[in-house]
Image (cartoon, rainbow, N blue to C red):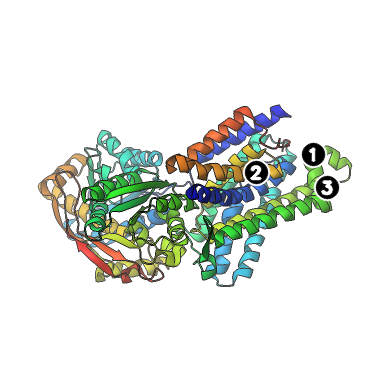
């Protein structure tokens, strides 16, 4: 029983990480309709930036966080302005957006190799990051607390942004009906830039969290991207709470399944869950609302 | 909207599966062809892109050092070696493409490669293509006898994993062992060897857990392993996921001896990312060239001067460098005998000669009847992961 509880706790934590990554993607999909696979590049780029400022340049954690946020936000805006906006102008189909996004991800990985080389970059763990303790049946790590803290921060900030700011309200209006939003005076292009900025800033958080736990590699966003897509389908594509719920659900399923099954089956359980949702409940847990790009 | 939602979900699923299939990177190596009767191509198939490119690109650099030096050494024999490299991405599919290109387009007589999944995939195809296939950096035990044209220049895990398993059971008195392994051919093969050897030595493997390559978290695997209350834990993982395993072991308070192999213990990125979670870990290295050897040190210094950093896996790199001299010796002998340098003749010569004593770093190597090599196994202990692996003290040398 103790093991089951520990596995469930591990699942919630890793699920929050998936959810955090999916959350930014979901915000972008809900508003712009783009399935933004290049989000994986934002994650990897911000992780490299975090490593660069913290480990390579030794500029301290505060500068490293700001640097990673700046790079992550900039990457999101650049992809919107340089790729998606021209595609929107020519009324490209969803499939074209998808292929463009995948191309950006692949090209971006090549660019990271060109800039940083292929050898993995590692952040040396400090005593602060290594801290862990036992609480009842649970082993609680500093990494767990950082993930919980980052998730709470991101979810609260985006909730407040969407409920109480004109920019956030414009996200919802554009996501609901872009043509109607435009007739109400909302500038679509500006809203898209804002949403890519906000969504990308959220992706910086898992980027930094991964950088302090594992070596940073150009392909590091890939595994998480797949999990995020599964989380989006399970939670409801385009639904903000759905991204969180989907992330946590797949984290728990992946982790708890190995209580009864060999660990090599954990990914199988995720894909089984994915197909169950696609066939039986394609709208996901929360009936995600989405529109075309 | 349900129709559109369903369509969008289907696109997302297809894309997710596509992402899974296409892996983490792309790109290719390259090589140049040359004419000249006295220039012999050396086909090299390594991971030049993707998650394992850090190791693969270093491997190619060390092979190129070997080519440069061997060409000087064998200049008086009137032949030169030219490396032609292709990218395998450390995957079976890309590996087969690389082999096909090297054999059919570049017409190389021999291909030198690494990564167990790649070697395994290439082994039957090399027979069809008529090229000699040399494994110079993969250690899955089932590579023994995997193909008629395959010879394992690199010692398989059946050597070092068997040695460490037996040592922990017999010398350290461990009765129960647990294994955490990467979910691929390397991990599966090594785990089987460990289990067989440990249980043959009187112990019992009470848990074997797998982790996906490049996984970001290993806490569930470690929780399961610790729940089985082993006396020792063996970790057989690759570069990307190793630090997650080591950190999880430390965070969950693993107190038992942890063993692994040089691919983890000597990897600079793993040591840096794991920090003191690696301290106390025992890892295997193979006899022959040691990182403290002046010749190896000289080669490392050359690499550091060129690249501005330490090589990612020096235990492997010495085999990369030496493999060129091994190939040069074969070419020299075949030329002396008046034989054509082709796949068939290369294999025939390796099988008849078996002992090669011209290797600058390893000194010599001997092939068994099964096309494998056997080495002494040295166990080393990491006392301070922030230091260079060369400073790790030796625990014991185990004779084969």
Could you tell which of marks 2 and 1 lies nearer the N-terminus?
Answer: 1
Camera-side mark, 3 or 1: 1
Position of B63 compared to B75: left or right? right
> Where does residue A202 sit, x and y in percent of width and height?
66, 54
Residue in the picture at 49% in, 67% down: A124
Mark 1 lies on a secondary structure that is: helix
Residue in the picture at 21% in, 57% down: B170
Chain bearing tag 2 is A
Q: CA distance from mark 3 to mark 1?
A: 14 Å
Mark 2 lies on a secondary structure that is: helix
> Which quadrant of the figure contains the N terminus of chain B?
top right
Q: Is residue B275 above or below residue B234?
A: below
Q: Quadrant of residue A262?
A: top left
Q: Quadrant of residue A240?
A: top right
Residue under label 2, please give it: A245
- Res. B157 visible in picture: yes
Q: CA distance from mark 2 to mark 1?
A: 21 Å
Determine crowd level at label 1: few under 14, some 14-19, many 20+ residues with C-alpha closer than 10 A: some
Camera-side mark, 3 or 2: 2
> Where does residue A170 sit, x and y in percent of width and height?
82, 47
Residue in the foreground of this view, choosing between B194 and A3: A3
Residue under label 3, please give it: A187
Residue in the foreground of this view, choosing between B167 and B112: B167
Camera-side mark, 2 or 1: 2
> Which quadrant of the figure contains the C terminus of chain B?
bottom left
Residue under label 1, please give it: A176
Could you tell which of marks 3 and 2 lies nearer the N-terminus?
Answer: 3
Position of A31 compared to B47: left or right? right
Could you tell which of marks 3 and 1 lies nearer the N-terminus?
Answer: 1
Q: Quadrant of residue B107?
A: top left
Chain bearing tag 1 is A
Mark 3 lies on a secondary structure that is: loop
């Amino acid at each position: 029983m103790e093991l089951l509880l520990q596995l469930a706790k591990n699942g919630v934590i890793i699920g929050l990480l998936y959810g955090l990554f999916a959350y930014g993607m979901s915000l972008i999909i809900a508003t712009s309709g783009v399935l933004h696979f290049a989000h994986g590049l934002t994650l990897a780029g911000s992780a490299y930036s975090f490593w660069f400022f913290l480990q390579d340049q030794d500029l301290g954690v505060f500068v490293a966080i700001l640097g990673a946020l700046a790079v992550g936000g900039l990457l999101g805006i650049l992809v919107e302005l340089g790729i998606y906006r021209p595609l929107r102008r020519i009324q490209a189909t969803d499939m074209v957006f998808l292929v463009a996004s995948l191309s950006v991800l692949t090209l971006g990985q090549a660019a990271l190799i060109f800039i940083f080389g292929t050898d993995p970059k590692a952040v040396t763990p400090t005593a602060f990051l290594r801290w862990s303790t036992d609480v009842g049946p649970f082993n609680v790590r500093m990494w767990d607390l950082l993930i919980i803290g980052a998730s709470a921060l991101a979810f609260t900030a985006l909730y407040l942004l969407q409920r109480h700011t004109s920019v956030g309200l414009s996200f919802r209006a554009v996501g609901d009906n872009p043509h109607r939003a435009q007739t109400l005076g909302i500038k679509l292009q500006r809203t898209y830039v804002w949403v890519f900025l906000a969504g990308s800033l959220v992706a910086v958080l898992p980027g930094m969290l991964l950088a302090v736990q594992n070596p940073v590699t150009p392909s590091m966003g890939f595994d998480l991207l797949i999990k995020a897509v599964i989380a989006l389908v399970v939670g409801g594509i385009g639904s903000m709470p759905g991204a969180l719920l989907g992330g946590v659900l797949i984290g728990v399923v992946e982790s708890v399944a190995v209580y009864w099954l060999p660990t090599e089956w954990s990914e199988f359980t995720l894909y089984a869950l994915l197909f169950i949702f696609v066939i039986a409940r394609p709208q996901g847990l929360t009936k995600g609302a989405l529109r075309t790009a | 909207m349900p129709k559109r939602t369903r369509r969008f979900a289907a696109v997302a699923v297809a894309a997710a599966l596509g992402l899974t299939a296409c892996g983490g990177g792309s790109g290719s190596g390259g090589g140049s062809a040359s004419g000249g009767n006295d220039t012999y191509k050396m086909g090299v198939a390594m991971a030049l892109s993707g998650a394992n490119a850090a190791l693969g690109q270093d491997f190619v650099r060390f092979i190129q050092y070997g080519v440069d030096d061997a060409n000087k050494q064998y200049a008086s024999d009137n032949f030169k070696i030219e490396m032609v490299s292709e990218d395998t991405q450390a995957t079976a599919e890309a590996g087969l493409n690389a082999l096909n290109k090297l054999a059919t387009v570049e017409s190389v007589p021999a291909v030198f490669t690494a990564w167990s999944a790649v070697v395994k995939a290439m082994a039957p195809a090399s027979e069809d293509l008529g090229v000699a296939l040399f494994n110079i950096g993969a250690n899955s035990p089932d590579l023994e006898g995997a193909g008629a044209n395959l010879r394992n220049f690199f010692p398989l895990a059946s050597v070092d994993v068997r040695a460490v398993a037996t040592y922990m059971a017999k010398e350290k008195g461990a009765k129960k062992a647990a294994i955490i392994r990467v979910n691929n051919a390397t991990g599966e093969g090594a785990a089987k060897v460990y289990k067989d050897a440990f249980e043959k030595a009187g112990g019992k493997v009470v848990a074997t857990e797998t982790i996906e390559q490049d996984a970001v978290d290993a806490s569930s695997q470690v929780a399961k392993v610790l729940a089985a209350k082993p006396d020792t834990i063996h970790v057989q993982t690759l570069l990307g996921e190793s630090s997650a395993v080591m950190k999880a072991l430390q965070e969950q308070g693993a107190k038992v001896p942890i063993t692994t192999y040089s691919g983890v213990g000597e990897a600079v990125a793993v040591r840096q990312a794991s920090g003191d979670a690696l301290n106390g870990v025992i890892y295997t290295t193979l006899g022959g060239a040691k990182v403290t050897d002046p010749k190896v040190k000289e080669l490392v210094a050359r690499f550091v001067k060129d690249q501005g950093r330490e090589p990612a896996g020096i235990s492997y790199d010495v085999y990369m460098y030496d493999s060129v001299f091994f190939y040069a010796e074969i070419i020299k002998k075949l030329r002396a005998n008046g034989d054509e340098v082709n796949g068939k003749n290369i294999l025939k010569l390796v099988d008849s000669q078996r002992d090669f004593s011209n290797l600058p770093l390893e000194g010599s190597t001997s092939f068994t009847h099964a096309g494998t090599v056997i080495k002494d196994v040295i166990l080393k202990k990491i006392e301070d992961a922030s230091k260079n692996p060369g400073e790790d003290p030796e625990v014991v040398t185990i004779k084969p």
